[in-house]
Image: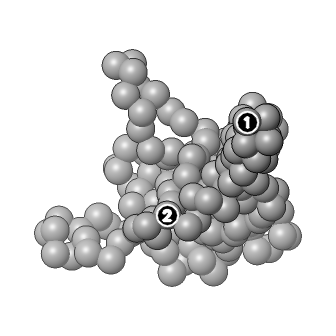
Amino acid sequence: MKKSIIFIGCLYLVSCGDYHLSNYMFKEYCADKGLVGQFVYEQEKLSDDFFREIPKENKDRIGISGDFYIDNKKYLIDADKFEKHYSITYVKLDQLSKIGPIYAKETSVVRKKDGKLLGKSVSLNNKKGWLHELNFLMVNTGDTCPIYITKDGQRISNPDHSTLIQNIFKK
């Protein structure tokens, strides 16, 4: 009887131990406000030649990234002109921990002229252990942070990556 309990305990630790450890580590990473969130290091005012007219027809808006609208969609940054002066890295994945594994996803904006980082957004993803990677549907979204909650208590998706350009650049 005692050996059976020890065997079951060891089996549980081998199969689910990294799940609990990754959750603990993930909470610690998410609590670090210097690691996770949106960081704007310098705001820039763009001249009028960086902007284009907002298309009136919906069919003409196809293919325009929502990231380039600023000031509550009053202005639209011309992506071609913008990319001559600034570099955007949309997804850079770094593995923070093999346990989980836990990944950091980073979006950053750099001024090409001097290589200065103007801002970045960092979110984390915990895949919750090797056992979750072997699930039947092969879908493992895991947990993410930071998590934003509305006044009603509803969770909303993380807007940090999509609003980075809006928070750095002004007209």
Quarter of image, res 90: bottom right
Q: Position of residue 161 (x, y in %)?
A: 56, 54
Q: What element carries label 1?
A: loop
Residue holding disc 2 = 135
Q: How crowded is mark 2: few (under 14 residues within 10 Å), some or many (20 or more)?
A: few
Q: Where is residue 117 in the image (x, y as percent from the top left)?
A: 79, 60
* Residue 160 vs residue 136, the one in the foreground: 136
Left or right: residue 83 compared with residue 70: right
Q: In this view, does 135 lie above or below 72?
A: below
The amino acid on which the numbered mark 1 sits, given as a three-letter code, is Met
The amino acid on which the numbered mark 2 sits, given as a three-letter code, is Asn
**Residue in the picture at 32% in, 67% down:** 53
Q: Is residue 36 visible?
A: no
Q: How crowded is mark 1: few (under 14 residues within 10 Å), some or many (20 or more)?
A: few
Distance (Cα) linking label 1 and label 2: 31 Å
Q: Earlier in the sequence, mark 1 or mark 2?
A: 1
Residue holding disc 1 = 1
**Residue in the picture at 16% in, 68% down:** 58
